[in-house]
Image (spheres, helix red, strand yellow):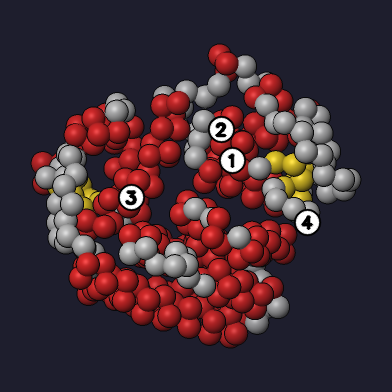
Amino acid sequence: MDRTPAYASITERLRRGIESGSLPEGAVLLEGPLASIFGSSRSPVKQALARLEEEGLLSRFDGRGLLVGTTGEPIRLKITAEMFDMDAAAMPAAKHFAWQSLYYDFEREVILRSVFGRFRVNELALARHFNVGRTVARDLLIHAQQVGIVAKGEKSHWWIVPLDEARFQDLYDLRMLLEPAALETAVGAIPTPVLSAMAGRLEDGINRAGDAGIAELDVLEEELHIGCLSYGRNPEIVEALKRTRCILVSGKHFQVALQRQPFFDSFMEEHLEILQAIGRQDVNGAKHLLRAHLEASSEKAAERLAAFRATHQVSPTSYFV
């Protein structure tokens, strides 16, 4: 089975289309239509577009989407599979991308249940619930394990990792200790085009926050808390921070479940301020803004967790035991 990450396959298909001229200079690329063509969710498409923007093959303009090339007027043409040399037989198998299109629904159910304790996840029941094979169900669980919301326990059973106030605070304390240290050595090492591309995506997200989905917001979260910090000189810090990734994604699920308006908070504005400080190579300013952002996020996370537990009960789900 092909284990190439979805975003890498999509990046290569898009790159070939651009370099061959099938995607002409000025063509406008949008995430939704591309996700349909490649049979994927928006998240890997967004990652692919970001990678090609960093390479200089795509650019931003005053409108939705990204422009092929860096000059010329936008061309609103229909993007088709044929532009990527993808006839029906060459289309990627749905199974390859299936877990990605299902993941955010699964992640939401796991996180919302985790506040009520430890539950076992039945892999076979999970496959039946989503009408997929065991391989896809296992891929869902493996990705959730990498995020830190499920773990493999006794007899190789999968278990939800409980997420209570104490664990939330412990994980935020860890991030407040490690992230500023990682950022200190990353400032100056992050390429300017990468910073500019990240800032552009944040500005776009701020302008249409109500239109952004959870998958897209996760990418914006990761670009600062994972992408930027990965340029630091100490890879052990980055590895340790992986254990705390669940708190980056949980808050938005609580907000949606609580039906808060607006659904998503001001993290994008805070991220943009931090990136601007990084761009100025203001190490102390960037560290101060990052620490303040994490402290504010910790308080909001604790409030959402308490509100959710007070207003919700464990709902029956076929694949939890």
Q: Which mark is residue 107?
A: 3
Whether residue 277 is visible to the viewer of this picture, yes or no, is yes
Please state which amino acid type lies under the numbered disc 2.
Ser
Please state which amino acid type lies under the numbered disc 3.
Glu
Q: Find disc 4 in the rendering and name its residue.
A: 62
**For this view, does 280 lie left or right of residue 7?**
right
Q: Position of residue 235 (x, y in %)?
A: 47, 62
**For this view, does 158 lie left or right of residue 193?**
left
What kind of element bears circle 1?
A: helix
- Between the C-alphas of marks 3 and 4, the distance is 34 Å
Query: Disc 2 or 4, which lies upstream in sequence?
Result: 2
User: Do residues under tags 1 and 2 come within 8 Å of each other at their CB atoms?
Assistant: yes
Query: Disc 1 or 4, which lies upstream in sequence?
Result: 1
Label 3 Cα neighbours within 10 Å, binned few <14 / some 14-19 / many ≥20: many
Q: Find disc 1 in the rendering and name its residue.
A: 32
What kind of element bears circle 2?
A: helix
Q: Which residue appears farthest toward the top when viewing the image?
A: 89
Which of the two residues, 186 or 216, is positioned nearer the viewer here? 216
Label 1 Cα neighbours within 10 Å, binned few <14 / some 14-19 / many ≥20: some
Residue shown at 19% from the left, 40% from the top: 319
Query: Disc 3 or 2, which lies upstream in sequence?
Result: 2
Whether residue 168 is visible to the viewer of this picture, yes or no, is no
Q: Quadrant of the N terminus?
A: top left
Total marks placed: 4
Q: Find disc 2 in the rendering and name its residue.
A: 36
Please state which amino acid type lies under the numbered disc 1.
Gly
Q: Position of residue 287 (x, y in %)?
A: 54, 81
- Between the C-alphas of marks 2 and 4, the distance is 24 Å
Query: Disc 1 or 3, which lies upstream in sequence?
Result: 1
Q: Quadrant of the C terminus?
A: top left
Please state which amino acid type lies under the numbered disc 4.
Asp
